[in-house]
Image (spheres, coloured by chain):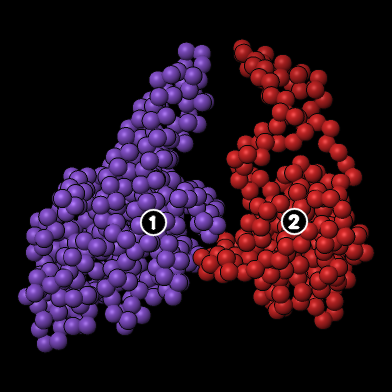
Chain colours: A purple, B red
Amino acid sequence: MDFSLSEEQSMIKRVVREFVKREVAPTAAQRDRTGEFPRDALRGLGELGLLALPFPQEWGGAGDTVAYAVVVEELARACASTAISYAAHVALGCGSLFLFGTVEQKERWLRPCLRAEYLAAFALTEPNAGSDAAATQTTARLLGGEWVINGTKCFITNGSVADVILITARTEEGISCFIIPRDAPGLSIGSQYDKLGLTASDTAELVFEDCRVPARNLLGEPGKGFRQFLTVLDSGRIGIAALSVGIARACLEDSLRYTQQRKQFGKPLWDFQATKFKLADMAVDVELARLMTYKAAWLKDQGRPFTKEAAMAKLFASEAAMRAAVEAVQLHGGYGYIKEYPVERYFRDAKLMEIGEGTSEIQRLVIARELERGL
Amino acid sequence: MEIVVCVKQVPDTETRIKIDPAGKGIVREGIEYVVNPYDEFAIEEALVLKEKHGGKVTVITAGPDRAVDALRTALAMGADEAIHIQASQEDAVDSIGAAEVMARALKEIPFDIILCGKQAVDDDNAAFAPALAEFLGLPHVTVVTGLEVDPEAGEAQVVREIEGAQEHITTSLPAVIAAQKGLNEPRYPALRGIMQAKRKKIPVSTLADLGLEGETLPARTEVLSMMPPPPREGGEKYEGEPEETVARLIKALQAEKLV
């Protein structure tokens, strides 16, 4: 057993840390205020080849999901909006195309996505099909060599900035997946949601009204769309877990610094045992969340089953991030409640981790289902 | 063009340095190491020269096993080859020794220009480049913020920073050029470079291979003691009406000969 990062993983970590320090961290608070999408950062990550990271070398990547988790954590340490835009593009968008695309589809759509020429989104959730994704109501009918799609998708990360959107829709065979170009006739993009946190992440509603795409835009096998999307979501959860680790670490590091500096009753807050207990618990949470995230990523890279472990990592890490955010605000007191300090942003951003890509309740159901399988 | 870059691995600039109990060096445990930031400007400039004039970039370092990470970083940025001179350098602050070793190694390989950082951010000696040039019998220019090379003429136009002005210098090549911040913006190593760097073989030579004795860089100096800077004392606070406090402040500044 070896818990250390490889030489390349360490180098990727150093590079992304430097990138984050120069290109992401200085503008994070401003992005949170204005909601400006982090397009430059994604382009920069594309130039570094980091959009291809979890994919094999023939796609310019390293086939390294552990390194991908390292990158997501580093991004989220500074700006969770940037991290989720990256994770949604790479794991969900590019991941769907990589896993289920034909050679032609990959050349047409995946290749430009990996170079950051295209952004990708993954659209599963509907107004009446959230956690119950099998209740998908969007339909696709084959008419005159074209798929005609009708329905609505909601809460879609990268929805309005994406050049290519992967969706699920009902066909005769069951649920199937489709590749929808941004400019497909009949696709309209609703207004941006006014969110609690992750304000610079793009979240949109997509409306399909007799939206037409060529027959060749079917992704994967007809009727297997639901199973395909579950597979993609397993990888996606590693991303949310890593994002949570990044947010939790931000809470820990900021609270450590603040409690050393802030004096009350004639001594730094750090000197009170109650403070030390909170920070020790936070440090344990960060460490355990990261270990489980790396384990799920490692299993995936080994080609072994990782559904249960990805759900465990996502569940534990997201709840750890929320706990850390609550305590970080508490430790900062009144300063934690105002926007002068970033912990209130961590607090707002952390909550989505317990909701997106399957709520904590759904993660528990996924874990229980896997337990049942082993009986 | 044969371009050589001398690099040094130094503690990460964000490391909190602690003095070891013996008081002659720093605690090395738990330190993360990086390429000396000024050397990054030198690597970037070497890559720019190669892109412009063609040729090959070779990076070289003298240091312990871990120093190979600095070479891998340079390879990942785009350098072609790397040479590792195995040498313990713990707490050696003697740049002359490092230059002597490097000069011996460079006698074995061809070069048209040698680049390095103007100083290492750990010991801040800024003596390596001039010493290396002296050992090799070459001209050198330090604190360089601009470089134009004419390989045909065997010349380089160099801009160097001096107090309140810039110096424009023409030097013959080969020469030793020591980079200052502002020379360029170093690129990040991209994933492709990182993956390629992993596959490159890095030849290692020992000090004995270079005809030197011992395992430590030859030193002409000895560290007698190392201590942290004295803690900052609290400032003085003047309270009262502005007319009175400003007068006191001016008096204090005059007493310190600051105004």
Discs 2 and 1 carry the same chain letter: no
Q: Nearer the viewer, residue A363 or B251?
A: A363
Please state the horizontal and vertical placement of residue A97, each as a whole percent of the image. 30, 72
Left or right: where does residue B176 sit relative to residue B232? right
Please state the horizontal and vertical placement of residue B10, each as a whole percent of the image. 69, 48
Please state the horizontal and vertical placement of residue A25, each as a whole percent of the image. 48, 48
The chain under label 1 reads: A
Residue A368 seen in the figure: yes
Residue B141 seen in the figure: no
In the displayed structure, B60 sits above or below A256; it is below
> Rounded to the nearest whole Å, what is the CA distance between mark 2 and mark 1?
34 Å
Residue occupying image coordinates x 75% and y 56%: B86
Q: For mark 1, what is the residue?
A: A298
In terms of image quadrants, where is residue A228?
A: bottom left
User: Considering the image in quadrants, where does the N terminus of chain B appear?
Assistant: bottom right
Q: At label 1, which amino acid type do we have?
A: Trp
Residue occupying image coordinates x 76% and y 52%: B87
User: Any mark on residue B86, and which?
Assistant: 2
The chain under label 2 reads: B
Please state the horizontal and vertical placement of residue B47, each as a whole percent of the image. 67, 69
Q: Secondary structure at mark 1?
A: helix
User: Any mark on residue B199, and which?
Assistant: none
The local crowd at label 2, few if under 14, some if 14 to 19, many if 20 or more residues have their Cα within 10 Å, is many
